[in-house]
Amino acid sequence: MVESAQHKEHRIFGMTFASLYPLYVQKVERKGHSSSEVDEVLAWLTGYDKGGLDRVIADGTDLRTFFAEAPAMNSNTSLITGVICGMRVEEIEDPLMQKIRYMDKLVDEVARGKKMTSILRSA
């Protein structure tokens, strides 16, 4: 039974954070933003500081582990709404996929030039 459960699992869960991070940075840099802005939204979402991000990149940590070991998932993630990859993030049922799409959505908002206070769901 374990095999069939793994078979159904989305392959993005096994992707390394290190493979995604440079893509996020490239995306925001193309639009005139910086890697520090990516780091800021990732810290808000997961609690990883720059050293923590550098460590998971160096260790080849997969996304499943990246989120499972996140120092402090933000309690305001439910405030992240909208469409990413054709899906409404607030309606994604799989908790891990939802966290991955939250991350995509935040990086997207940086790239689009949204104000950081708005991205970080500040009052």
Image (cartoon, grey):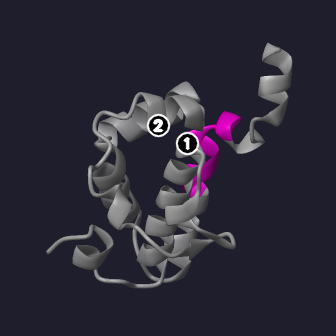
Asked which secondary structure carries label 2, the reply is helix
Residue 107 in percent (x, y) is at 47, 67
- Give the label on residue 43, or none: none
> Pointers 1 and 2 in contact (CB under 8 A)?
yes
Quadrant where the N terminus sits is: top right
Q: Nearer the viewer, residue 107 or 67?
A: 67
Q: Is residue 36 visible in the rendered structure shown here?
A: no
Answer with mark 1 or mark 2, whichever residue precedes in sequence: 2
Magenta span includes 47: no
Q: Residues within 10 Å of mark 1 (few under 14, many from 20)?
A: some
Q: How many numbered badges does the structure rendering display? A: 2
Asked which secondary structure carries label 1, the reply is helix
Q: Nearer the viewer, mark 1 or mark 2?
A: 1
Q: Is residue 99 above or below residue 91?
A: above
The majority secondary structure of the magenta stretch comes to: helix
Residue 34 in percent (x, y) is at 40, 69
Q: Is residue 43 above or below residue 80?
A: above
Q: Nearer the viewer, residue 61 or 54?
A: 61
Q: Which residue is mark 1?
A: 96
- State the CA–CA distance, disc 1 to disc 2: 7 Å
Q: Quadrant of residue 36?
A: bottom left
Residue 110 in percent (x, y) is at 42, 75
Q: Which residue is mark 2?
A: 67
Q: Nearer the viewer, residue 109 or 97?
A: 97
Quadrant where the C terminus sits is: bottom left
Residue in view at x 40 percent, y 61 percent: 38
Q: Which residues are magenta?
A: 13-22
Residue 84 in percent (x, y) is at 60, 71
Inspect the image, locate mark 2, and give the three-letter code of the amino acid beneath it. Phe
Residue in view at x 29 percent, y 82 percent: 115
